[in-house]
Amino acid sequence: MIVTTGIEVEGRQIAEYLGVVRGIVVRATGIGRGIVGGLKSIIGGNIVEWSHVCEQARMEAFNRMVQHAHEIGADAIIGMRYDATEFSQGATEVLAYGTAVRLSQNHLR
């Protein structure tokens, strides 16, 4: 599956727009990482424990988006973006979204 933040796939024509696809994950830090991260936040700097949780959430949201695109027969996802919203203390929604497309079998030259 081709995934790009651009609005086209280089060398390929878009034959059909299939609509928006998305992957949503709600992730909490967990008590162990939350405590360690909370202590480190007092000192300042990069909080590796929280970075790890964020990266896992992004990866899972991305994979869910790609699965959604596969389910509707897409060849690619264009205009891919992430969004995150903290909706309660310690719980964050991560959304990966983009436009699913079918590509023409003809390659541009």
Image (cartoon, grey):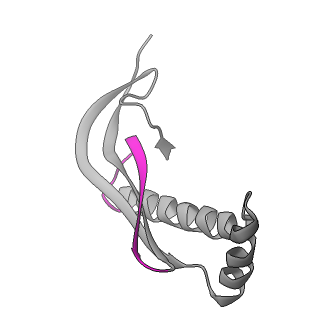
Using residue 57 as the reference point, say whether residue 82 is left or right of it. Answer: left
- Magenta stretch, main secondary structure class: strand
* Residue shown at 49% from the left, 58% from the top: 62
> How many numbered badges does the structure rendering display?
0
The percent position of residue 98, horizontal first and vertical second, equals: 35, 47
Q: In this view, does 8 lie above or below 81?
A: above
Magenta span has 34? no
Q: Is residue 22 above or below residue 91?
A: above
Q: Can residue 76 be seen by looking at this rendering?
A: no
**Which of 43/61 is in front?**
43
In terms of image quadrants, where is residue 109? top left
The percent position of residue 86, horizontal first and vertical second, equals: 42, 70
* Residue shown at 41% from the left, 44% from the top: 80
* Residue shown at 32% from the left, 40% from the top: 102
Residue extending furthest toward the front: 42
The percent position of residue 91, horizontal first and vertical second, equals: 47, 78
- Which stretch appears magenta? 71-89
